[in-house]
Image (tube, rainbow, N blue to C red):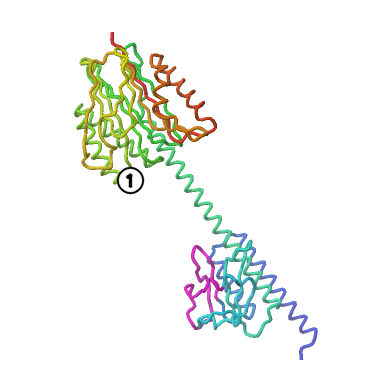
């Protein structure tokens, strides 16, 4: 029979060993050792100090995985975990009291759930060299030790995820900044503003990178091309697609001024480059100064308004084809022509203007836009755009803009 002194000495040795184990584990965590090293330390601590005969530690890391195991004869893998039953276990439980028949469980005496903030992070299956009651100090210490290790590893995972997310966000931000720079290069740096030809553009992207595009391309003999477009989607893919679109357009314009041919070739490029993932609405206008003729094709874009100052007629530029990038070849292409056009004002825009909504969920619409333009058509272009922005801001009331806002005005006055 052991004397009281022997029992006290043995308890003192046990407590000292437990304290040293905790200190070693804590120092290792502070020294930022790897997760695999922490699992190894947990394994050797359980195996060498606490009369644990068999152990299996299952941890949830996106999926349930067995992180360390020793002493078992039957293969015990994560696919054998019956999570529906185990998730109802909130404290150390004897295996014999669980309704699980798989023989892999029968090698173990108890299962110990490890929780943090009411979330189960791990299940530890244990078999001891002797019968140990549920309230035993060794059970309590094993739970404390396992909790420290598992929670430390969980914190490592969270930090790793946060660093990964931060790196991803930084990478995305860099990509967005590059794409924004690419997009800014698409817009003409300088637009003409002479006695005969005035062009004014206003562009407000809804996000950091918008999907709108406009361009002015001067040609020989004072002729010019004016165009406006809107690509489906936003962000980097939209900006890159629009960049390719502009490069293709400017290349084609150097080869031909046949608008039908330009539209056909552009559609072919978009259809095969975007692979059905994006489409573009597009309106292109070619003005021949000598012939006083305006040619245009509208590819599914909002019809532009053309005010003929000599006849007081208002033309909607509706003729053309369908949106680009959906069909190959295009089902039809119709070129619009307006002749005897000497003095006029042309207003182009994207759907962010007409789709502006107010507190009653009403859209501004093209009819209201036309009425506003009729009031200002002969004003200076900068004044027209400023007045339009004022109208939009008043109309939308407390609502946010729902899309990019692009306005492109052109005024021609012949001597």
Residue at figure coordinates x 34%, y 20% from the top left:
410
Asked if residue 74 is among those painted magenta in the image, a careful observer would answer yes
* Residue in the foreground of this view, choosing between 213 and 260: 260
In the image, residue 316 sits, relative to residue 68, either above or below, namely: above
Instruction: Using residue 241 as the reference point, say whether residue 127 is left or right of it.
Output: right
Q: Position of residue 372 (x, y in %)?
A: 43, 21
Which quadrant: the C terminus?
top left
**In the rendered image, which residue does mark 1 sit on?**
277
Q: Position of residue 174 (x, y in %)?
A: 45, 41
Residue at figure coordinates x 43%, y 33% from the top left:
355
Q: Position of residue 158 (x, y in %)?
A: 55, 56
Residue at figure coordinates x 52%, y 70% from the top left:
67
* Residue in the foreground of this view, choosing between 210 and 152: 210
Residue at figure coordinates x 37%, y 28% from the top left:
349
Image quadrant in which you'd find residue 194: top left
Which quadrant: the N terminus?
bottom right
Q: Residues within 10 Å of mark 1 (few under 14, many from 20)?
A: some
Instruction: Using residue 19 as the reference point, say whether residue 226 is left or right of it.
Output: left
Image quadrant in which you'd find residue 33: bottom right
The part of the chain drawn in magenta is 56-85
In the image, residue 413 sits, relative to residue 305, either above or below, namely: above
In the image, residue 263 sits, relative to residue 221, either above or below, namely: below
Asked if residue 81 is among those painted magenta in the image, a careful observer would answer yes
């Amino acid at each position: 029979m052991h004397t009281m002194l022997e029992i006290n000495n043995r308890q003192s040795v046990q407590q000292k060993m437990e304290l040293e184990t905790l200190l070693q584990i804590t120092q290792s965590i502070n020294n930022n050792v790897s997760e695999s090293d922490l699992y190894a330390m947990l394994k050797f601590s359980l195996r060498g100090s606490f009369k644990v005969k068999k152990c299996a530690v299952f941890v949830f890391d996106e999926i349930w995985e067995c992180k360390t195991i020793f002493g078992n004869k039957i293969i015990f893998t994560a696919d054998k975990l019956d999570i529906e039953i185990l998730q109802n276990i909130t404290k150390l439980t004897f295996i014999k009291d669980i309704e699980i028949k798989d023989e892999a469980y029968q090698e173990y005496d108890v299962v110990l759930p490890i929780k943090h903030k009411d979330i189960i992070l791990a299940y530890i299956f244990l078999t001891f060299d002797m019968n140990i009651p549920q309230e035993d100090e060794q059970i309590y210490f094993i739970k404390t030790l396992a909790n420290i290790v598992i929670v430390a590893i969980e914190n490592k995972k969270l930090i790793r995820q946060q660093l990964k997310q931060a790196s991803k966000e930084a990478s995305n931000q860099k990509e967005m900044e590059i794409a924004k720079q690419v997009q800014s290069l698409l817009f003409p740096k300088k637009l003409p503003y002479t006695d005969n030809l005035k062009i004014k553009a206003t562009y407000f992207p809804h996000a950091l990178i918008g999907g709108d595009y406009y361009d002015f391309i001067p040609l020989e003999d004072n002729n010019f091309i004016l165009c406006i477009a809107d690509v489906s989607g936003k962000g980097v893919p939209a900006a890159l697609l629009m960049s390719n679109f502009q490069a293709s357009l400017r290349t084609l314009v150097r080869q031909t001024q046949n608008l039908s041919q330009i539209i056909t070739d552009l559609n072919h490029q978009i259809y095969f480059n975007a692979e059905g993932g994006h489409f573009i609405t597009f309106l292109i206008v070619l003005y021949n100064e000598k012939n006083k003729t305006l040619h245009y094709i509208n590819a599914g874009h909002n019809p532009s308004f053309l005010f003929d100052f000599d006849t007081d007629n208002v033309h909607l530029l509706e003729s053309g084809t369908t949106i680009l990038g959906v069909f190959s070849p295009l089902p039809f292409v119709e070129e619009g022509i307006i002749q005897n056009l000497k003095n006029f004002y042309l207003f182009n825009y994207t759907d962010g203007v007409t789709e502006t909504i107010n507190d009653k969920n009403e859209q501004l619409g093209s009819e209201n836009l036309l009425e506003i333009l009729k009031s200002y058509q002969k004003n200076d272009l900068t004044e027209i755009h400023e007045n339009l922005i004022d109208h939009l801001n008043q109309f939308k009331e407390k609502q946010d803009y729902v899309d990019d806002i692009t306005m492109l005005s052109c005024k021609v006055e012949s001597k």
